[in-house]
Image (cartoon, grey):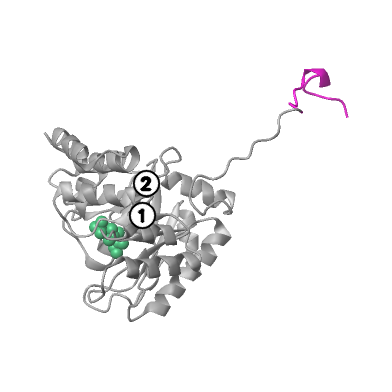
């Protein structure tokens, strides 16, 4: 067969240059398949290794949450500042423009409401729909210590199995029942169980005491939820302390969209997460942008 695109002499094979092989930037993720790494790399910024996920999925069990009554009006203006949108397929299809460049973390568990036992969830989205929606990850609630602990763990492991088949990571969301103690001991237990059973990354709550033991004992990345609305400076302090204690980002909702200035707040959170800005400086940024 003749060489159709030129002479052998013109080709350059760099025979003395070994092929490079870079380790994947995310903790515990080096053995994942290419598609899964590529999707995680759309959630976590490969330069900072962190993510600012904007959580707007609260309606899946509590209806039109304060700040989320009109996602088209209140949330779309925040989209440019988020790395990822975490939401339900209903909101994705009805409100989010399909030309968004942001990665999508799709809420796939559900089936309960605030009127009943919250831990009684099932898988509420088919993996095929996650593929169709080009999800970068799928989020499943896991209630360790909750009434339906086992069922929610199995929801997660089923999603991990299906996600592995299609190359889509599973985010395990550790949900804490009303009567349970939120401390490092509990979150070490909950996050480690989710990681051991295959979740590619985990969302948990920040606790001021010993949070670094939670991230240290968890072999995959941890992101923190924001929780109930607190003053902006306190929320920035929480995000900062979590990052300094080893968190790989935030999946924050109410402390952004219920802020007096959500656009300023999400930018201040970005500064803390991606640039290691100290909370007081990030709060200055918030106040400057707010004006
Ligand atoms: C609901 C969720 C939310 O996405 C999560 O709680 C993050 O939002 P917030 O920062 O408002 O706590 O997983 O179950």
**Percent position of residue 57, x then y:** 29, 59
Q: Nearer the viewer, residue 89 or 46?
A: 46
Identify which residue is drawn at 20% across, 46% down. 73
Toward which corner of the image does residue 203 lie, by quadrant?
bottom left
Instruction: Answer yes or no: is residue 172 visible.
Output: yes
Q: CA distance from mark 1 to mark 2?
A: 8 Å
Measuring from the top left, give residue 236's x and y in whole percent: 22, 47
Look at the magenta stretch and give its main secondary structure.
loop
Mark closer to the chain start, 1 or 2? 2
Q: Is residue 87 visible?
A: no
Q: Position of residue 10 (x, y in %)?
A: 78, 18
Q: Residue pushed farthest right?
A: 1
Q: Is residue 72 magenta?
A: no
Q: How would you rate the neighbour count of disc 2 (Cα within 10 Å): few for under 14, some for 14-19, many for 20 or more? A: many
Does the residue at mark 1 contact the one at mark 2 (Cβ under 8 Å)?
yes
Along the viewing direction, whichever of 49 and 97 lies nearer the viewer: 49
Taking the magenta stretch, the answer to whether it contains residue 5 is: yes
The residue positioned 22% from the left and 64% from the top of the image is: 63
For image coordinates 19% across by 44% down, the residue present is 262
Q: Which residues are magenta?
A: 1-15
Q: Quadrant of the N terminus?
A: top right
> Mark 1: which secondary structure?
strand
Q: Which mark is residue 223?
A: 1
User: 26 or 55, which lies in front?
Assistant: 26
Q: Which residue is mark 2?
A: 51
Query: From the viewer's perspective, is 258 left or right of 48?
Result: left
Name the quadrant containing residue 190.
Answer: bottom left
């Amino acid at each position: 067969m003749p060489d159709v695109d030129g002479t052998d002499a013109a080709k350059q094979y760099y025979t003395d240059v070994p092929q490079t092989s870079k380790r994947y930037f995310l903790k515990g993720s080096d053995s994942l398949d290419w598609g899964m790494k590529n999707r995680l790399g759309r959630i976590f910024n490969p330069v900072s290794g962190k993510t600012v996920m904007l959580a707007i999925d609260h309606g899946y069990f509590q209806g039109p949450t304060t700040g989320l009554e009109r996602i088209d009006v209140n949330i779309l203006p925040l989209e440019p500042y988020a790395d990822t949108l975490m939401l339900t397929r209903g909101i994705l299809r009805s409100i989010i423009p399909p030309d968004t460049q942001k990665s999508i973390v799709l809420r796939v568990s559900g089936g309960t409401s605030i009127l009943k036992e919250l831990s009684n969830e099932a898988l509420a989205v088919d993996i095929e729909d996650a593929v169709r929606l080009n999800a970068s990850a799928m989020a499943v609630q896991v209630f360790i210590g909750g009434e339906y602990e086992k069922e929610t763990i199995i929801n997660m492991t089923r999603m991990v199995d299906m996600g592995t088949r299609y190359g889509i990571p599973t985010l395990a969301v550790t949900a804490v029942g009303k009567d349970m103690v939120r401390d490092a001991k509990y979150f070490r237990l909950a996050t480690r169980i989710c990681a051991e059973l295959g979740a590619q990354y985990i969302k948990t709550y920040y606790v001021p005491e010993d949070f670094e033991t939670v991230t240290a004992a968890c072999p995959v990345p941890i992101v923190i939820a924001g929780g109930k609305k607190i003053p902006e400076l306190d929320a920035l302090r929480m995000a900062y302390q979590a990052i300094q204690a080893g968190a790989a980002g935030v999946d924050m909702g109410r402390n952004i969209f219920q802020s007096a200035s959500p656009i300023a707040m999400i930018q201040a959170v970005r500064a803390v997460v991606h640039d290691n800005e100290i909370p007081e400086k990030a709060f200055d940024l918030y106040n400057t942008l707010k004006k």
